[in-house]
Amino acid sequence: MVIQTGKMAWNAVCANKMRTFLTMLGIIIGVAALIILVSLADGAGNSVAEQIASMGSNYLSVRISDNKENPLKYNEFMELFTTEEFAEAAPVGRTSVTAKTEYINHSLNVYGTSGGYFAIMDMDLRAGRILKRADLQNRSNVIVLSYDTAVEIFGRADVEGESLSLDGRAFLVAGVLSEESASPSSAMTVRSSDDSSETVVLEGYIPYTTLGQITDNVLEISQFYVSSADEDSMDLAQMKLEEILLGRFGNDEDAFDVQNQSEVMEAMAKTSNTMSMMLGGIAAISLLVGGIGIMNIMLVSVTERTKEIGIRKAIGAGKSSIMLQFLLEAVIVSLSGCLIGIISSWAALQVIGNIMGAALSVTMNVRVALLAVAFSAVIGIVFGLYPANKAANKKPIDALRYAG
């Protein structure tokens, strides 16, 4: 009996294909919008999370805003933060210089730091060595270049041992970072206006003490990074760091700001989830509108088929059979629209993925697709109940007399 009712519902849906398709359109658009928007939000969130994770997640970033007229110097810095709670500690300062070789000159972003910075930021070497403690003690004129910088200035990456002039000072290239290693603060690629070429932002790393000789702006440590000895004890490392800083700056909490990288990642994940839910909620409204369209067309269908309902009741069809048929019609329309919407969203995401390339990894969120199927089924049932109930409650005599 149920199978026969299902066949009748399918035939009724297929009897007017254009009207059925237009009825489905609201569901198709709603499902496609839901999946595409949530998938794009997830892709953007994952992309940012991967970039943050590539910088490392077990370090603390500190910015000193008030030194109490007692600047923090490098030697004191190393004494304060050489404890068992910290794996590495590295000051950071920045300036811009003109880098020259025999044949070329470029503007170069120079970061003054120590060897611990490379470990904190999980930056690997391609060749040569990183900065050593002796380099900082002796204020050595040595520099570690990023991969892109070495290629841009020298035309090749294996340039350790080469000489480079920074604002007239000769520097020895001690090492070159791997192509995958990027600075969290400045590594980026800028496209020119015609999109035909790319301008690489050049950067290099020199001893922090040497940076103080190049520029007068770096006379004290106002920013530094500290990594936890144990990635699972970030809270303990942060408590120890704040204890040291409070002791150094007279218990003034406003004198410095500590940022936990793992907290940044957690906040980013929460923001991404909130964005996905917000976009999903907006797209879900389209599904509700599609459900209203289904109810509307089903009411029209009930009115048009009043005589058919009367005949079926006259030959013995029960109220439940009539109700089930019209309810199945609403569910079939809703789920068919959902299926087309899923296929359309998959195709759209493939196109978006090809356009965005490596800049944004976009894949269909399967969980959202399954949720869309469940939601569409519920919409078909909820918005189909009233028309189905109206059809089932028609009296056979009144239905047979209907001449509309």
Image: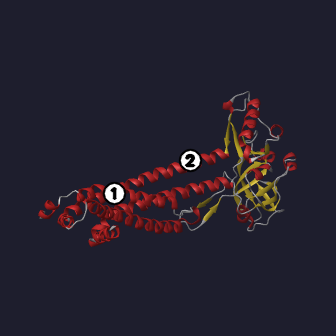
> Which numbered circle lies on residue 270?
2
Residue 343 x/y as whole percent = 44, 68
Tell which circle, 1 or 2, labels the residue nearer the N-terminal end: 2
According to the picture, the residue beneath numbered tag 1 turns out to be 291
Q: Is residue 382 above or below residue 74?
A: below
* Number of numbered discs: 2
Residue at image point 48% right, 60% down: 370
Residue 365 appears in the rendering: no
| Image quadrant in which you'd find residue 213 | top right
* Circle 1 or circle 2, nearest the eye: 1
Identify the residue at horizontal 38%, vertical 53% (top origin).
285
What crowding class fits label 1: few (fewer than 14 Cα within 10 Å), some (14-19), or many (20 or more)?
A: many
Q: Position of residue 358 (x, y in %)?
A: 59, 65
Q: Is residue 319 visible?
A: yes
Q: Quadrant of the N terminus?
A: bottom left
From the top left corner, tell me how far across and down residue 29 is, in percent: 38, 62
- Secondary structure, mark 2, is helix
Q: Residue furthest top?
A: 250
In the image: residue 353, left or right of residue 248: left
Horizontally, is 331 left or right of 169 in the view?
Answer: left
297 up-or-down from 83: above or below: below
Q: Nearer the viewer, residue 359 or 172?
A: 359
For the residue pair 162 and 73, the one nearer the viewer reads as 73
Label 2 packing within 10 angstroms: few (<14), some (14-19), many (20+): few
Left or right of 387? Residue 158 is right
Marks 1 and 2, how far apart at CA: 31 Å
